[in-house]
Amino acid sequence: MKLPTAVACLLLLVVVFAAARVEARGTPSSQRSKNQWSSMFVFGDDFVDNGNVPNNIGEKTSRQWSYPYGSYLNTHYSTSPVLAGRFSNYRMQSDFIARMLGLSEAPPAYELTSDQSCDSSGMTFAFGGAGVFKVKTKKVPTLAAQVQAFKRLVNDGVISTHQLHHSVALIAISGNDYMSDSDFETGFYTSFDDLDTYIGNVATEILDNVAQLQMLGVRKVLVNNLHPIGCTPLHTSSNNYTTCDLLGNYGASVHNKYLKQMLDERDNVHILDLYTAFTDIVNHAPGGGSDQSKDFKGKLSPCCESTDEGGFCGERSHSGKRLYDLCENPDKTFYWDQTHPTHAGWEAVMMALQQPLMEFLDEDYIA
């Protein structure tokens, strides 16, 4: 059967989406907001999950709880493995934002916190693999479910009004709604209008949860837009890590268009432009790019790569043999694994985003 050209292109875009999937140094840690933002509440997915996904799922250890995740600095630095529960080799986005607020790191994970308690620095509700809609193979709470858990703590008085009025929220939705086993991948879209509607629904869900957080009393809300997923090693591996996938990046830009339209006029909300910050480092024109781009030799390839087709970073055989390769210096590589930045990658991204972020945090709250 020969498909009409528009439908064929549409299906190709769906396939592309389905395939996707040390102390802070330098500028991001050297400056903090003049306002007293003493708490941070974090929602979303693996870009900001610092321990909510269980250590063990069935008989397998979750990879973010396994070396080299959380504690790989370089091949010459001797260190005992630190099980940090993060999808990176050390710090990640929420850690760098926490530093800007004057905190030492991202607030504790919800699942690792005692019932009916909340740290003075806030709490991280994000779960690796989460989206705004249920991802069928990931038994993790959606963004709305995470916000509901937060709401219960507010209603029970565990999170006080005073803490809320000195708090910043971060929402990081990084593309799981467009990947394997999501409603996007398993749905049958007969036109670009159907696809447009689905992406618009994802953005609307983000907007609804931003509104819910604001109604509960959070003063400032930060929202990630979608990074150029076509530049992740999961996409670039098919061409030997040389070029980004255009359709993957186009899909991200459509998501970001809707997000901007919905959030631009909303008071006390700031979009963190990950798309531009990532692009300026890994996918710029020859001779262009940000100053941070020059720090990376590996921009489209991962530092940690499975040696087994279908495997993953951190995987070991039953005998304990390592089934992955590591780069010598992750500080020179932007991506840690197939989808997540290294500590150095996140540091560079947040350095690029720091000035507009700090200006937003320093603005007076608009009641």
Image (tube, grey):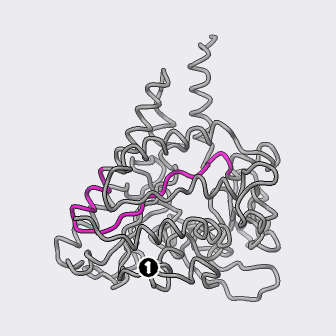
Quadrant of res 336: bottom right
- Describe residue 359's horizontal placement relative to residue 240 as left or right: left
Q: Is residue 329 above or below residue 299?
A: below
In depth, the one of 299 and 34 nearer the eye is 34
Q: Measured from the top left, where is residue 122 in percent x and y?
A: 35, 78
Residue that label 1 marks: 33
What residue is shown at x 50% (from left), y 50% (from top)?
176
What residue is shown at x 45% (from left), y 31% (from top)?
196
- Describe residue 253's horizontal placement relative to residue 161 as left or right: right
Q: Measured from the top left, where is residue 273 in percent x and y?
A: 53, 56
Q: How many marks?
A: 1
Q: Which quadrant: the C terminus? A: bottom left
Q: Which residues are magenta?
A: 208-231
Residue 37 lies in the magenta-colored region? no
- Describe residue 123's horizontal placement relative to residue 307 as left or right: left
Q: Amino acid at mark 1?
A: Ser
